[in-house]
Image: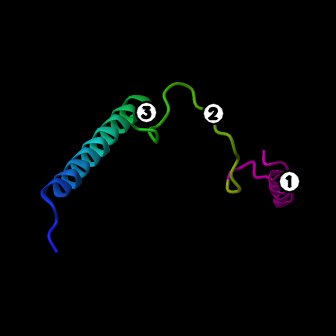
């Protein structure tokens, strides 16, 4: 069984076009993600930061019942 020369050239041209388009789209996505995403998202924030929660080991510890009720409220409302 022989593969015709034209058919082989069509397959090679298709593969070359496919690889070229794949690399081009990857480059565009990489460029956009570099421009849009922050450089280091887990860096310490600048300016005045406010602590949102109080820990149990802190001097003004809250009772476990309030944590349980807040957890239930979170599961019910999602907030």
User: Which residue is at the front of the view, 30 or 74?
Assistant: 30
Residue plotted at (71% across, 50% down): 59
Which residue lies under the disc numbered 3? 38
Quadrant occupied by the N terminus = bottom left
Residue 63 percent location from the top left of the image: 83, 57
Please provide the residue range marked out in magenta. Answer: 58-79
Give the alpha-carbon distance from disc 3 to disc 2, as whole Å. Answer: 21 Å
On screen, residue 12 versus residue 64, left or right, reads left
Answer few, some or many: residues within 10 Å of disc 1's Cα (few below 14, many 20 plus, some between 14 and 19). few
Give the alpha-carbon distance from disc 1 to disc 2, as whole Å. Answer: 26 Å
Disc assigned to residue 57: none
Disc assigned to residue 76: 1
Residue 31 percent location from the top left of the image: 33, 33
Answer few, some or many: residues within 10 Å of disc 2's Cα (few below 14, many 20 plus, some between 14 and 19). few
Among the two numbered marks 3 and 1 on one chain, the one whose residue lies closer to the N terminus: 3
The reply to whether discs 1 and 2 touch (Cβ–Cβ < 8 Å) is: no
Residue 44 percent location from the top left of the image: 47, 37
């Amino acid at each position: 069984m022989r593969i015709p020369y034209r058919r082989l050239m069509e397959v090679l041209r298709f593969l070359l076009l496919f690889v070229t388009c794949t690399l081009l789209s990857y480059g565009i996505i990489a460029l956009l993600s570099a421009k849009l995403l922050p450089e280091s998202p887990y860096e310490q924030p600048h300016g005045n930061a406010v602590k949102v929660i109080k820990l149990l080991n802190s001097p003004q510890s809250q009772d476990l019942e309030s944590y349980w009720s807040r957890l239930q409220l979170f599961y019910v409302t999602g907030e």
